[in-house]
Amino acid sequence: MLCMPSAKCPICGLNVELPDDVLPGEIIEHECGVVLEVVKDRNDGVVLKPLEGISEDWGE
Amino acid sequence: MIIVKIGGNVIKKNLDNVLYDISELAKNQNVIIVHGGGNIVTEISKKLNIEPKFVTSPSGIRSRYTDEKELEVYVMVMAGKINKLIVSKLYALNVKSIGISGADGPILIAERKKRIIIVNQRGRKRVINGGYTGKIKKVNRELINNLLALGYVVVIAPIAIDTDGTLLNVDGDQVACILASALKVSTLIILTDVEGVVVDGYVLKAIKLDEISSILPKIGPGMNRKLLMIKEAIKSGVNKVIIASGLKPEPIKHALEGSGTYIMGE
């Protein structure tokens, strides 16, 4: 059986399914309304944290 | 006082004609030139075996990604090759000019974009380090005004500096619009490789400030950004902005006589 990687939403606690080839820095817009960033953890796995510090499209 | 922004394609294809017009203009008024040249930076980067990187923003804007190596080339080409080419050609036209970057003085203080969101090759949004690009936060008018008072045409390369002393790549249109606002210039001319703002195949002759929002969805991302910056410049007191082709003979004369798109407050 195929098993999609997943991580817990730090806001609502629900499991969030992630793409197989997910990369640190990718952004997940979760159904609970929060925008999450994929972050590498100590064990080379991934966790989710709320996206912070970016408020605008840059378009430089 | 007038500011002329010269885009990279215009520099490559029609610089002599543009500078001849500026030599005529400078007989009667103060002139500031802001130049671009990203395409020339790309060429030189490739010659130095530094492959330029481009990233796409969530709204679809493709842009140069400036890492440390690319910044070195950017500064060399913008503040060196292109800036001094313009100064030397103006000298040959008997125009007294001085070429500086925004980091000189400094006249342009910017804030580094620490992190940016891009769309990666998988089509998914990703946060990456912002590299060496910046958004201008402060303009020091004193140096520019002093140079203009001494009779120089001021030629400005789009490089800013942050409060830590880091050089930053800043967009040439952003530099031109912010300088126009800060110096309250009467006219800003943006010379580009298209005839003006084109909607449904036609060049718009004039756009009023309150019409800009409704035009934005009908134009491409590059022009879209220009108009957003121009909107802010007009709101802060710039009389008119003209977006016109810089690829013709006498491009500035034609722009001032009505070709291209005029954007005004009322």
Image (cartoon, coloured by chain):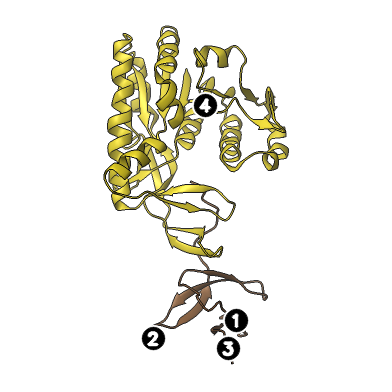
* Residue at the spot of label 2: A43
Type of amino acid under label 3: Leu
Binning the other alpha carbons within 10 Å of mark 3 as few (below 14), some (14 to 19) or many (20 upward) gives: few
Question: Could you tell me residue B4's position as x and y percent?
Answer: 47, 23
Q: Give the residue drawn at x 63%, y 30%.
A: B197
* Residue at the spot of label 1: A16
For residue B126, above or below residue B107: below
Which chain identifier belongs to the yellow chain? B
Pointer 3 or 1: first along the chain: 3
Q: Secondary structure at mark 1?
A: strand
Type of amino acid under label 1: Val
Tag count in the figure?
4
Residue at mark 3 shares a chain with residue at mark 1? yes
Calculate the distance from the C-alpha at mark 4 to the C-alpha at mark 1: 48 Å
Q: Give the residue drawn at x 40%, y 11%.
A: B23
Calculate the distance from the C-alpha at mark 2 to the C-alpha at mark 4: 53 Å
Q: Give the residue drawn at x 28%, y 25%.
A: B84
Closest to the observer: B209 or B125?
A: B125
Q: Secondary structure at mark 4?
A: strand
Closest to the observer: B60 or B235?
A: B60
Calculate the distance from the C-alpha at mark 3 to the C-alpha at mark 4: 56 Å
* Residue at the spot of label 4: B190
Q: Secondary structure at mark 3?
A: loop
Q: Chain of mark 4?
A: B
Residue at mark 3 shares a chain with residue at mark 4? no
Residue at mark 2 shares a chain with residue at mark 4? no
Q: Secondary structure at mark 2?
A: loop
Mark in the foreground, 3 or 4: 3
* Residue at the spot of label 3: A2
Identify the mark at residue B182; answer none if there is no mark: none
